[in-house]
Amino acid sequence: MGKLAVFLAEGFEEIEALTVVDICRRCGLQADMVSVTGAEMVKSSHGVSVQADRQFSEVDFGEYDMLVLPGGMPGTKNLEAHEGLMEQVDAFYHSGKYIAAICAAPSIFGHKGFLHGRNACSFPSFESHLKGAQVTEGPVEISDHVITSRGMGTAIDFGLAIAGIFCGEEKAKAMAETIVYRK
């Protein structure tokens, strides 16, 4: 089973973060919401306050199999400005561990040069930040250990893709049926 950390910064997109957490927990995965703000409650881009499971300073990153960056503004900028988180994203990428981002957040991977030669997607107005990528309009792109997705409307696809990595495609398909999701 996999263990993933979903990072919450002020201004995160709540559907993108919580859909991943919900689907992964339904599949039996441990999906921890981690605040990078120093506060337990984190306010989303639409004023929804969400209680994090952990603070960034409490996390043992060696226990995790994937880091997930939700989009939203200014959430994406706040994630990218967090030096400790960016160090962990770099470490996961270079060690071949999974990193995932949705909406505006794949721009962070583009800024770091992680998308060269990969298929990748993001919110349309952020596609210019996907440096070196073959930009697609697919709902989710999985390229080795780098996963990207387009936005709020693809959050279920993103969550199911992540669950599929750790639980298998059959369980992800069964979960899609359970939640009455049809493409």
Image: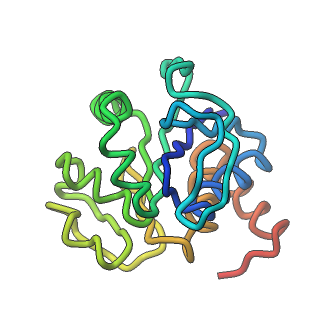
> At which x and y percent is residue 151?
48, 71
Q: Quadrant of the N terminus?
A: top right
Residue drawn at 25 percent across, 59 percent down: 118
> At which x and y percent is residue 162?
57, 52
Residue drawn at 52 percent across, 30 percent down: 38
Front-most of 55 and 166?
Answer: 55
> At which x and y percent is residue 59?
54, 21
Q: Is residue 106 above or below residue 63?
A: below
Residue 84: which quarter of the image? top left
Front-most of 109 and 72?
Answer: 72
User: Which residue reaches farthest right?
Assistant: 178
Q: For this view, does 92 lie left or right of residue 19?
A: left
Residue drawn at 23 percent across, 48 percent down: 114
Residue drawn at 22 percent across, 55 percent down: 110
How is the protein colored in the picture? rainbow
Residue 117: which quarter of the image? bottom left
Q: For this view, does 87 lie left or right of residue 16?
A: left
Q: For this view, does 99 lie left or right of residue 24?
A: left
Q: Quadrant of the C terminus?
A: bottom right
Residue 4: which quarter of the image? top right
